[in-house]
Image: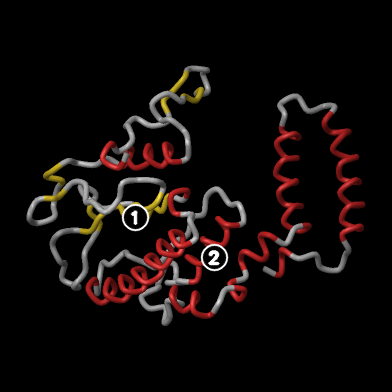
Amino acid sequence: MADMRLNGITVDQLSDRRRLMQSFDNLRREIDINGSIQALDAAQERALGVLTSSRLLEALDISREPQRVRDRYGDGKPYNFQFDGAPTVNDQFLVARRLVEAGARCVTLTFGRWDSHGQNFNLVRDHGGKLDQCLSALIEDLDARGMLNDVTVVVWGEFGRTPRINNGAGRDHWAPVSCCLMAGGGMRTGQVIGATNRLGEIAAQRPVYSGEVIATVYRNLGINPDTVNILDPTGRPQHLIGHPALPEVR
């Protein structure tokens, strides 16, 4: 957060430096044939906006929240089973809500380390309880503020875990089946879509493809995955995703 404040200079001095930079860019722009300078300008505008506006800095400062709200989310401590993964920082879910309020269109965070090749049951009991607290707090908080229909919450990993327990009381990587939790976004929630077989090995009822989840997120963002195309490097139009949005949540 300290890097998002002006240190050692004033706003006027920053403006002087900005004008100097623009004068150099004007010279470079005369020989720019691919538009890279214009694209860079947009990124610089956003970066300078962080330094000259307090909205982002204030959003990251959860000390502005009432203590009861912070207690509802929890802090996720102690950080157990971290190893090569992310800590269980529950506070980040509260930061996510504040960033959305400040105008962020997309917020991504990594919570915990779920690669349970060993000690699976101890790890999941630790991480699961912490995630349940902060995730339910986020959804309730968004709903209480009238924001839930405008925010799509997606909780997802990249694969599932083996149905069989290994010799280290762990579960290894399992690509055939996984799970995803979605909330908000004006979706019809409170339902389970699809099911595995008895042993959790494969999708036995209504297989849901990852593309369907991504298409649903596009639709919630106001982008119709059925009609919107993008041009590939050869100029040919391509669909955004190869699957339709989930019809069950319309």
Question: How are the residues colored?
Answer: secondary structure
As measured in the structure, the alpha-carbon distance from the residue carrying label 2 to the one carrying label 1 is: 21 Å
Q: Which residue type carries mark 1?
A: Gly
Give coordinates of residue 221: x percent, y percent.
Answer: 47, 40
Which residue matches tag 2? 95
Q: Is residue 125 above or below residue 4?
A: below
- What residue lies at 46% left-to-right and 24% top-to-bottom? 229
- What residue lies at 28% left-to-right and 67% top-to-bottom? 116
Give coordinates of residue 44: x percent, y percent.
Answer: 74, 46
Per the rendering, the mark at residue 186 is none
Q: Is residue 14 above or below residue 220?
A: below
Q: Which residue type carries mark 2?
A: Val
* Helix, strand or loop for disc 1: loop
Quarter of image, res 247: top left
- What residue lies at 68% left-to-right and 60% top-to-bottom? 55
Which residue matches tag 1? 157
| Left or right of 149 on screen, residue 164 | left
Q: Is residue 49 above or below residue 97?
A: above
Quarter of image, res 167: bottom left
Residue furthest out toward the left: 198
Q: Nearer the viewer, mark 2 or mark 1?
A: 2
Pick whichever, 16 or 69, lies toward us. 69
Q: In which quarter of the image is the N terminus?
A: bottom right
| Left or right of 204 on screen, residue 9 | right
| Left or right of 115 on screen, residue 103 | right
Which badge, 2 or 1, comes first in the chain's sequence? 2
Residue furthest out toward the bottom: 78
- What residue lies at 35% left-to-right and 54% top-to-bottom? 156
Q: In this view, does 225 lie above or below 55?
A: above
